[in-house]
Image (cartoon, rainbow, N blue to C red):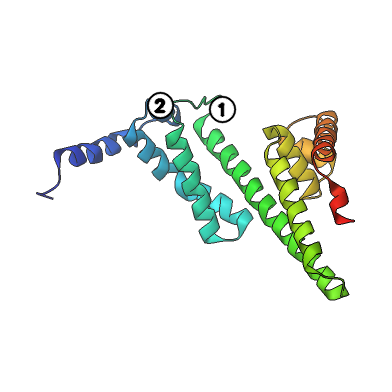
């Protein structure tokens, strides 16, 4: 330990002190871009957030990458984040949104490959058609990614996970009417911006 720098020794001592801070105190320090506060938050929440993501994704590497990405974003945007909820609630919501996005992209890819395989099995596959299907899938994914956050979340739960309006409302804590309106608006956007006739 003789070669350890004074700065690093100070960080270790600080982490011992910071570990006693409440989540609220750490969040306040994080907004000031306090590095030790960030490391303390990371150590406090990484494992439980990782297990939460792993439970849904069933893939350790993907879950770990997702959590690392979450914390990288947390540090980059630390000064701008408004913790309207407590720190743990904010982190859990962030993980939930990232998991939904990850599963959505996985689902779209799986549906596309399944559809393509069905065409091959039916003997009607050709290169031009495969290109059109791929281009359409990419157009849809791009349009969905540009939708307002809440609309995108509702639409993905409806179309990619086949949840009912009531199930989506319960999961997101909004009304059935709001869900119906968001899905309708999302479909309207897709109809206006995508040429579905390319498949025929």
Residue labelled with disc 2 = 25
Residue 1 lies left or right of residue 38; in this view the side is left
Residue labelled with disc 1 = 85
Mark 2 burial class by Cα count in 10 Å: few <14, some 14-19, many 20+: few
Across and down, in percent, residue 171 comes to: 73, 39
Residue 23 lies left or right of residue 101; in this view the side is left
Q: Is residue 180 above or below residue 66?
A: above
Residue 42: quadrant of the picture: top left
Q: Residue at x 50, y 32 (%)?
A: 87
Q: Is residue 80 above or below residue 186?
A: above
Locate the C terminus by quadrant: bottom right
Across and down, in percent, residue 80 comes to: 48, 25
Across and down, in percent, residue 21 comes to: 37, 31
> Does residue 171 show up?
no
Q: Is residue 44 above or below residue 179?
A: below
Q: Residue at x 55, y 34 (%)?
A: 90
- Residues tagged 1 and 2 counted as in contact (Cβ below 8 A): no
Residue 149: quadrant of the picture: top right
Residue 23: quadrant of the picture: top left
Q: CA distance from mark 1 to mark 2?
A: 13 Å
Residue 183 lies left or right of residue 45; in this view the side is right
Q: Residue at x 74, y 57 (%)?
A: 134
Give the structural element (helix, strand or loop) at label 2. Answer: helix
Residue 191: assigned label: none
Q: Residue at x 82, y 32 (%)?
A: 185
> Does residue 177 show up?
yes
Residue 137 lies left or right of residue 25; in this view the side is right
- Foreground residue, 70 or 44? 70
């Amino acid at each position: 330990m003789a070669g350890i720098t004074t700065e690093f020794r100070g960080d270790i001592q600080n982490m011992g002190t910071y570990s006693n801070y409440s989540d609220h105190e750490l969040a306040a320090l994080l907004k000031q871009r306090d590095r030790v506060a960030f490391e303390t938050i990371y150590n406090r929440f990484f494992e439980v957030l990782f297990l939460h993501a792993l439970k849904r994704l069933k893939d350790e590497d993907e879950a770990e990458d997702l959590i690392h990405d979450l914390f990288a974003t947390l540090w980059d945007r630390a000064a701008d984040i408004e913790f309207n909820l407590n720190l743990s609630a904010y982190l859990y919501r962030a993980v939930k949104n990232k998991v939904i996005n990850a599963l959505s992209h996985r689902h779209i890819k799986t549906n596309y490959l399944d559809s393509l395989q069905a065409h091959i099995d039916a003997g009607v596959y050709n290169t031009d058609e495969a290109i059109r299907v791929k281009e359409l899938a990419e157009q849809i994914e791009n349009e969905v990614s540009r939708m307002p956050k809440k609309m995108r979340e509702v639409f993905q739960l409806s179309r990619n996970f086949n949840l009912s309006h009531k199930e989506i409302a319960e999961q997101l804590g909004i009304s059935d009417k709001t869900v119906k309106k968001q899905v309708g608006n999302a479909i309207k956007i897709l109809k206006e911006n995508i040429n579905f006739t390319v498949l025929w």
